[in-house]
Image (cartoon, grey):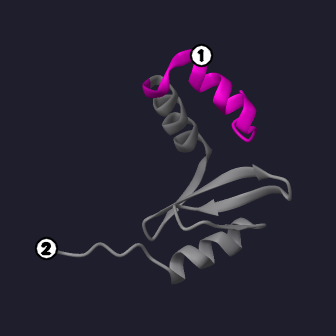
């Protein structure tokens, strides 16, 4: 399974259903996570620019793990108290 290929992901979702696809995707995200810093899971992602390090749900990705870690440390996830 090539998780970086939208066509492969769509075919998988169609063949196994959305619930099972979401479970498989969550497992893939867990397996591709290389660091957990300041509330951000940093994971490798394949892009048209090559392999990058994505920082959580920020929409930010970096060429080196060090750059991703620095970004995560300086932009911690904020959890508000109620």
Q: Give the quadrant of the C terminus.
A: bottom left
Q: Position of residue 2 (x, y in %)?
A: 74, 32
Q: CA separation, marks 1 and 2?
A: 42 Å
Residue 82, disc: 2
- 39 vs 73, left or right, is left
What is the residue that sits farthest to the left in this orientation? Answer: 82
User: Which residue corresponds to the image point at 18% horizontal and 75% vertical from the top-left?
Assistant: 81
- Return the disc, 1 or 2, that comes first in the chain's sequence: 1
User: Per the image, is 15 magenta?
Assistant: yes
Residue 63, disc: none
Q: Position of residue 29 (x, y in %)?
A: 55, 43
Q: Marks 2 and 1: in contact by CB < 8 Å?
A: no
User: Which residue corresponds to the image point at 44% horizontal and 76% vertical from the top-left?
Assistant: 76
Q: Is residue 4 visible?
A: yes
Other residues around mark 2 within 10 Å, as few (<14) / some (14–19) / many (≥20): few
What is the residue that sits farthest to the top in this orientation? Answer: 15
Residue 15, disc: 1
Against 3, residue 52 (above or below) is below
What is the residue that sits farthest to the right in this orientation? Answer: 49
- 82 vs 31, left or right, is left
Against 71, residue 15 (above or below) is above
Q: Secondary structure at mark 1?
A: helix
User: Which residue corresponds to the image point at 48% horizontal and 33% vertical from the top-left?
Assistant: 22
User: Per the image, is 29 magenta?
Assistant: no
The kind of secondary structure the magenta stretch mainly shows is helix
- 34 vs 8, left or right, is left
Q: Position of residue 50 (x, y in %)?
A: 85, 55
Other residues around mark 1 within 10 Å, as few (<14) / some (14–19) / many (≥20): few
Which contiguous range is marked in magenta? Answer: 1-19
Q: Give the quadrant of the N terminus.
A: top right
User: Which residue corresponds to the image point at 41% horizontal and 72% vertical from the top-left?
Assistant: 77
């Amino acid at each position: 399974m090539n998780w970086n290929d939208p066509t492969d992901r769509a075919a998988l979702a169609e063949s196994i259903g959305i619930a099972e696809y979401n479970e498989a995707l969550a497992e893939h995200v867990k397996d591709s996570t290389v660091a957990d810093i300041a509330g951000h899971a940093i994971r490798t992602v394949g892009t048209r620019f090559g392999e990058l390090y994505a920082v959580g749900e920020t929409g930010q990705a970096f060429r080196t793990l060090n750059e991703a870690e620095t970004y995560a440390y300086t932009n911690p996830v904020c959890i508000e108290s109620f």
